[in-house]
Amino acid sequence: MIEKFYKLRIHPKSKHSKIFAKSKDTYEIWIKEPAERGLANKAAIALLAKELNIPAKKIMLIKGATSPSKIVKVFQ
């Protein structure tokens, strides 16, 4: 099983949901959902999964559950 780590910078409560690759392992993500009750985290992971073309259940939040900067681990 291959594991990769990605750094994310999340911008909740944006007008549009979009993702921008700053480098091969760093993404900036704008999402419509607010940063409460894990809604922003769930939406960001779903958007990253779509970008990487993998199921969202293969992405695990490692660090930054309550911060705009996050680190996720992807299992492939």
Image (cartoon, rainbow, N blue to C red):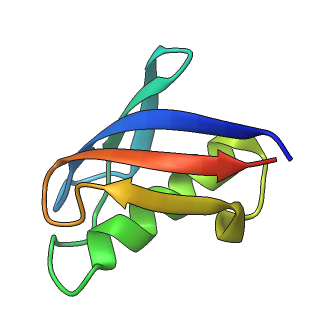
Residue 6 lies, in percent from the top left, at: 48, 35
Vertical comparison of 40 with 59: above or below = below
Between 34 and 72, the one nearer to me in the picture: 72
Farthest residue, direction right = 1
Between 29 and 67, the one nearer to me in the picture: 67
Farthest residue, direction front = 1
Horizontal placement of 75 versus 42: left or right? right
Question: Which residue appears at 55% of the width and 48% of the height?
Answer: 73
Horizontal placement of 41 versus 6: left or right? left
Between 34 and 4, the one nearer to me in the picture: 4
Residue 20 lies, in percent from the top left, at: 43, 27
Residue 44 lies, in percent from the top left, at: 41, 58
Farthest residue, direction top = 23
To which quarter of the image does residue 57 belong? Answer: bottom right
Residue 68 lies, in percent from the top left, at: 16, 49
Farthest residue, direction bottom = 37
Vertical comparison of 39 with 11: above or below = below
Question: Which residue appears at 53% of the width and 54% of the height?
Answer: 47
Question: Which residue appears at 51% of the width and 23% of the height?
Answer: 25
